[in-house]
């Protein structure tokens, strides 16, 4: 299939679709109809029955719709975590697969509706090079478009519907890639996904995680949304953080926390600081005390992450008793702290792990 336009309609909001329809000689309200079909995951113009046959033919000719292809699906033994490996490669432009991971996390609650959280990727690969991350081992292929990010959510919604589990309730932009290195596409996708005429996912049910691109954090603060912000910190001092996260050499902790303070002053919203615990690397009592000193007087919540083992990195997960002690120190120092539930240990649970194994021929 040959593209006649570079515009991905899935990445266009209602206003833009109305303008596109008007330019094609359609009545503008057809853009709203098109938007609703796309948000319902209908990527076949022939099924859009309240558009005329001629309109459908013109759209198909001018703006072909390509859904990502599911290459592989893994589900944990407890059924609570599903990982889909998707290919966004377009045969006329890209000779190799453009693979990303989408994670579906299922949380059952008593006396309230279940929570279905999607962990979204924003890039195919990642250029940040964090030492403990499987995604960065293969580098960055390219950014995802706003439409491709929206398509991820639609694929997750379809999976939930096929299994009669309901709708997507929450989004965390914590998958492959650095969201703020693809800022415009991410923000465009969030606006589309929040639209009441589409999936209508509330901003307070969305969270973006960044490794600390300070200029983008300030831009995000100025946007004054209700979308949550998470900071991948992973070390309490520059020496260690620069070893684990090369981005710290450009944006050291003092500069990062200044940007975070700006965010909280603008939005009055608490920031979640993510801290992946690595055995005998960043999990000591002294490091817990340092972290507490950094965050004790900030609007902060620490999310301690028991990492999944990735053989290529050489890092080991911290033992449970070490994690619990680390959390206890922070809580005693007045820093609200929780330990993230560990998921996907019996599948390729670490971010980028399934993609890397597939790229290497499926071997582990």
Image: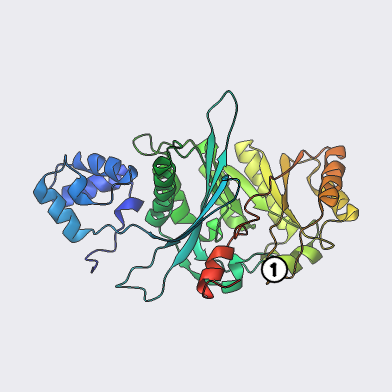
Category of crowding for the residue at label 1, using alpha-carbon neighbours closer than 10 angstroms: few (below 14), some (14–19), many (at least 20): some
In this view, the residue in front, 123 or 68, is 68
Q: Could you tell me which residue is drawn at 58 percent across and 51 percent down?
A: 76
Total number of numbered discs in the rendering = 1
Relative image position of residue 118 (x, y in whole percent): 51, 46
Residue 176 horizontal/vertical position (percent)? 55, 60
Q: How is the image coloured?
A: rainbow
- Residue 55 in view here: yes
Q: Residue furthest top?
A: 111
- Quick one: which residue is furthest to the front in this view? 77
Secondary element under disc 1, as helix, strand or loop, is: loop
Picture residue at 47% right of the left edge, 53% below the top: 186
- Of the 4 image quadrants, the one containing the C terminus is bottom right
Along the line of sight, which residue is nearer the eye, 265 or 186? 186
Say if residue 226 shows up in the picture.
no
Q: Which residue is mark 1?
A: 131
Drawn side of residue 21 relative to residue 291, left or right: left
Furthest residue toward left: 54
Residue at 64% across / 58% down in the picture? 211
Q: Nearer the viewer, residue 343 or 246?
A: 343
The correct choice, above or below, for 204 with respect to 253 in the image is: above
- Residue that lies at the very extreme toward the right in this rendered image: 286
Q: Quadrant of the N terminus?
A: bottom left
Q: Is residue 4 left or right of residue 292?
A: left
Q: Position of residue 78 (x, y in %)?
A: 60, 45
């Amino acid at each position: 299939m040959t593209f006649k336009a570079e515009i991905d309609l899935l990445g266009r909001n209602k206003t833009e679709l109305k303008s596109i329809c008007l330019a094609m000689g359609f009545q503008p309200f057809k853009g709203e109809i098109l938007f609703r079909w796309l948000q319902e995951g209908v990527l076949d113009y022939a099924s859009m029955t309240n558009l005329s046959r001629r309109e459908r033919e013109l759209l198909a000719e001018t703006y072909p719709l390509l859904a990502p292809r599911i290459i592989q699906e893994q589900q944990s033994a407890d059924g609570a975590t599903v990982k889909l490996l998707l290919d966004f490669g377009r045969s006329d432009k890209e000779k190799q697969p453009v693979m990303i991971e989408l994670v579906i996390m299922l949380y059952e609650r008593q006396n309230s509706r279940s929570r279905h959280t999607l962990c979204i990727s924003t890039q195919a690969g990642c250029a940040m090079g964090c030492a403990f991350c499987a995604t960065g081992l293969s580098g960055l292929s390219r950014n995802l478009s706003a439409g491709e990010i929206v398509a991820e959510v639609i694929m997750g919604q379809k999976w939930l519907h096929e299994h009669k589990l309901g709708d997507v309730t929450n989004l965390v932009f914590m998958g492959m890639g650095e969201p703020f290195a693809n800022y415009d596409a991410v923000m465009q996708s969030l606006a589309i996904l929040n639209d009441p005429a589409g999936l209508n996912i509330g901003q307070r049910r969305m969270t973006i995680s960044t490794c600390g691109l300070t200029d983008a954090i300030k831009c995000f603060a100025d946007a004054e949304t209700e979308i949550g912000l998470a900071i991948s910190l992973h070390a309490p001092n520059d020496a260690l953080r620069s070893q684990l996260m090369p981005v710290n050499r450009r944006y050291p902790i003092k500069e990062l926390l200044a940007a975070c303070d700006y965010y909280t002053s603008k939005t009055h919203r608490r920031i979640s600081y993510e801290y992946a615990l690595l055995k005998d690397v960043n999990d000591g009592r002294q490091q817990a005390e340092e972290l507490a000193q950094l965050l004790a007087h900030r609007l902060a919540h620490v999310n301690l992450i028991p990492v999944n083992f990735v053989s290529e990195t050489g890092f080991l997960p911290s033992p449970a008793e070490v994690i619990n002690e680390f959390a206890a120190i922070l809580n005693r120092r007045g820093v609200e702290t929780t330990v993230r539930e560990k998921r996907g240990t019996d599948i390729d649970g670490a971010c980028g792990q399934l993609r890397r194994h597939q790229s290497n021929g499926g071997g582990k």
